[in-house]
Amino acid sequence: MAELINQRFDERIAAIYDEETNAHRAKKKLREELNLNPQVLHVIGPKERKTAEKLEGRSAPIGKQMLSAHFLYAIASFLLGMLIALLLVEFGPSLFANNPLFTFMAFVSPGIFIGVFVGGLRSLKPERDRINQATIEAKGENKWTLVVDTEKAQASKDDIIETIKQTL
Protein backbone atom coordinates (compact mmCIF):
# COMPACT_ATOMS: atom_id res chain seq x y z
CA MET A 1 0.00 0.00 0.00
CA ALA A 2 1.35 3.42 -0.96
CA GLU A 3 1.63 6.27 1.52
CA LEU A 4 1.95 10.05 1.15
CA ILE A 5 3.86 12.04 3.77
CA ASN A 6 3.38 15.79 3.86
CA GLN A 7 4.35 17.85 6.87
CA ARG A 8 3.47 21.45 7.49
CA PHE A 9 6.97 22.79 8.21
CA ASP A 10 8.94 20.48 5.92
CA GLU A 11 9.34 21.71 2.37
CA ARG A 12 9.64 18.14 1.14
CA ILE A 13 6.94 15.62 0.25
CA ALA A 14 7.50 11.87 0.28
CA ALA A 15 5.51 9.07 -1.29
CA ILE A 16 6.26 5.47 -0.40
CA TYR A 17 5.53 2.78 -2.98
CA ASP A 18 5.62 -1.00 -2.82
CA GLU A 19 7.03 -1.32 -6.35
CA GLU A 20 9.94 0.40 -8.07
CA THR A 21 7.92 0.89 -11.24
CA ASN A 22 5.24 2.84 -9.37
CA ALA A 23 7.83 5.20 -7.88
CA HIS A 24 9.43 5.85 -11.26
CA ARG A 25 5.99 6.24 -12.87
CA ALA A 26 5.13 8.92 -10.29
CA LYS A 27 8.45 10.66 -10.91
CA LYS A 28 7.80 10.63 -14.67
CA LYS A 29 4.26 11.97 -14.16
CA LEU A 30 5.57 14.86 -12.02
CA ARG A 31 8.18 15.70 -14.65
CA GLU A 32 5.68 15.62 -17.49
CA GLU A 33 2.61 17.26 -15.93
CA LEU A 34 4.29 19.86 -13.71
CA ASN A 35 7.53 20.25 -15.65
CA LEU A 36 9.61 19.62 -12.52
CA ASN A 37 13.37 19.63 -12.67
CA PRO A 38 14.79 16.10 -12.17
CA GLN A 39 17.09 17.51 -9.46
CA VAL A 40 14.12 18.01 -7.09
CA LEU A 41 12.86 14.44 -7.56
CA HIS A 42 14.68 11.60 -5.80
CA VAL A 43 13.74 7.93 -5.85
CA ILE A 44 15.26 6.03 -2.93
CA GLY A 45 15.25 2.28 -3.14
CA PRO A 46 16.00 -0.53 -0.71
CA LYS A 47 19.63 -0.83 -1.83
CA GLU A 48 20.31 2.90 -2.17
CA ARG A 49 23.77 3.91 -0.97
CA LYS A 50 23.28 7.69 -1.10
CA THR A 51 20.15 7.89 1.02
CA ALA A 52 21.38 10.73 3.22
CA GLU A 53 22.49 12.81 0.25
CA LYS A 54 19.15 12.34 -1.51
CA LEU A 55 17.19 13.18 1.64
CA GLU A 56 19.21 16.13 2.90
CA GLY A 57 21.44 17.20 0.04
CA ARG A 58 25.11 18.01 0.42
CA SER A 59 26.39 18.46 3.96
CA ALA A 60 28.44 21.65 3.39
CA PRO A 61 25.40 23.95 2.96
CA ILE A 62 23.75 22.32 5.97
CA GLY A 63 26.86 22.99 8.06
CA LYS A 64 26.97 26.62 6.92
CA GLN A 65 23.29 27.02 7.80
CA MET A 66 23.88 25.53 11.25
CA LEU A 67 26.88 27.79 11.88
CA SER A 68 25.01 30.90 10.76
CA ALA A 69 22.04 29.96 12.99
CA HIS A 70 24.38 29.70 15.98
CA PHE A 71 25.95 33.08 15.23
CA LEU A 72 22.65 34.80 14.48
CA TYR A 73 20.99 33.68 17.70
CA ALA A 74 24.14 34.41 19.74
CA ILE A 75 24.35 37.96 18.39
CA ALA A 76 20.63 38.56 18.89
CA SER A 77 20.75 37.32 22.48
CA PHE A 78 23.91 39.35 23.13
CA LEU A 79 22.12 42.49 21.99
CA LEU A 80 19.04 41.62 24.03
CA GLY A 81 21.20 41.07 27.12
CA MET A 82 22.96 44.40 26.53
CA LEU A 83 19.62 46.19 26.17
CA ILE A 84 18.19 44.69 29.35
CA ALA A 85 21.38 45.47 31.30
CA LEU A 86 21.44 49.04 29.95
CA LEU A 87 17.82 49.62 30.93
CA LEU A 88 18.44 48.24 34.41
CA VAL A 89 21.58 50.33 34.92
CA GLU A 90 19.87 53.51 33.72
CA PHE A 91 16.36 53.13 35.09
CA GLY A 92 16.40 50.18 37.47
CA PRO A 93 17.01 49.88 41.20
CA SER A 94 20.20 51.32 42.65
CA LEU A 95 21.69 47.83 43.01
CA PHE A 96 22.10 47.71 39.23
CA ALA A 97 23.23 51.34 38.90
CA ASN A 98 25.93 50.86 41.54
CA ASN A 99 27.33 47.74 39.85
CA PRO A 100 27.06 48.30 36.08
CA LEU A 101 29.91 45.91 35.19
CA PHE A 102 28.35 43.03 37.08
CA THR A 103 24.92 43.86 35.68
CA PHE A 104 26.21 43.64 32.13
CA MET A 105 28.10 40.42 32.89
CA ALA A 106 25.02 38.90 34.52
CA PHE A 107 22.81 39.53 31.49
CA VAL A 108 25.19 39.32 28.53
CA SER A 109 27.06 36.09 29.39
CA PRO A 110 24.01 33.88 29.93
CA GLY A 111 22.32 35.60 27.00
CA ILE A 112 25.09 34.50 24.63
CA PHE A 113 24.98 30.90 25.88
CA ILE A 114 21.19 30.78 25.65
CA GLY A 115 21.37 32.18 22.12
CA VAL A 116 23.89 29.57 21.00
CA PHE A 117 21.75 26.85 22.58
CA VAL A 118 18.60 28.07 20.82
CA GLY A 119 20.54 28.30 17.54
CA GLY A 120 21.57 24.67 17.99
CA LEU A 121 18.01 23.59 18.70
CA ARG A 122 16.74 25.47 15.66
CA SER A 123 19.36 23.99 13.35
CA LEU A 124 18.42 20.42 14.32
CA LYS A 125 15.28 20.74 12.16
CA PRO A 126 13.06 18.19 13.88
CA GLU A 127 10.32 18.88 11.32
CA ARG A 128 12.38 16.94 8.77
CA ASP A 129 12.63 13.81 10.90
CA ARG A 130 9.28 12.24 9.90
CA ILE A 131 10.18 11.91 6.21
CA ASN A 132 13.73 10.77 6.97
CA GLN A 133 12.56 8.05 9.37
CA ALA A 134 9.77 6.91 7.04
CA THR A 135 12.26 6.59 4.17
CA ILE A 136 14.66 4.52 6.27
CA GLU A 137 11.80 2.28 7.41
CA ALA A 138 10.64 1.88 3.82
CA LYS A 139 14.14 0.83 2.76
CA GLY A 140 14.09 -1.83 5.46
CA GLU A 141 10.76 -3.12 4.17
CA ASN A 142 11.99 -3.24 0.53
CA LYS A 143 9.83 -0.31 -0.52
CA TRP A 144 10.61 2.66 -2.73
CA THR A 145 10.33 6.31 -1.70
CA LEU A 146 9.89 9.30 -3.98
CA VAL A 147 11.05 12.51 -2.27
CA VAL A 148 10.14 15.86 -3.83
CA ASP A 149 11.88 19.04 -2.67
CA THR A 150 9.11 21.59 -3.18
CA GLU A 151 11.30 24.50 -2.10
CA LYS A 152 13.34 24.20 -5.29
CA ALA A 153 10.43 23.11 -7.49
CA GLN A 154 8.71 25.39 -10.00
CA ALA A 155 5.24 24.18 -8.98
CA SER A 156 3.17 24.72 -5.87
CA LYS A 157 3.19 22.17 -3.07
CA ASP A 158 -0.56 21.60 -3.48
CA ASP A 159 -0.20 20.80 -7.20
CA ILE A 160 2.59 18.34 -6.45
CA ILE A 161 0.49 16.66 -3.74
CA GLU A 162 -2.49 16.32 -6.08
CA THR A 163 -0.34 14.80 -8.80
CA ILE A 164 1.22 12.33 -6.36
CA LYS A 165 -2.21 11.35 -5.04
CA GLN A 166 -3.14 10.30 -8.57
CA THR A 167 -0.28 7.80 -8.54
CA LEU A 168 -1.01 6.22 -5.17
Image (tube, rainbow, N blue to C red):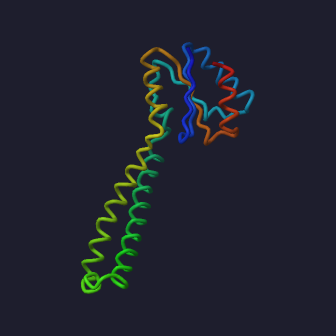
Looking at this rendering, what residue extends furthest in the front direction? 93
- Residue at the image position 45 percent from the left and 52 percent from the top: 64
Picture layout, residue 93 above or below residue 129: below
Q: Nearer the viewer, residue 49 or 155?
A: 155
Percent from the top left, x then y, of residue 141? Answer: 44, 15
Q: Report which quarter residue 81 is drawn in.
A: bottom left
Picture layout, residue 162 above or below residue 62: above
- Residue at the image position 68 percent from the left and 23 percent from the top: 28
Q: Nearer the viewer, residue 118 or 17?
A: 118
Percent from the top left, x then y, of residue 101? Answer: 26, 81
Picture layout, residue 8 above or below residue 67: above
Percent from the top left, x then y, of residue 132? Answer: 46, 31
- Residue at the image position 28 percent from the left and 82 percent from the top: 100
Percent from the top left, x then y, of residue 116? Answer: 35, 58
Q: Report which quarter residue 149 is drawn in.
A: top right
- Residue at the image position 63 percent from the left and 18 percent from the top: 168
Q: Nearer the viewer, residue 86 or 73?
A: 86
Q: Report which quarter residue 139 is drawn in.
A: top left
> Quarter holding the N terminus?
top right
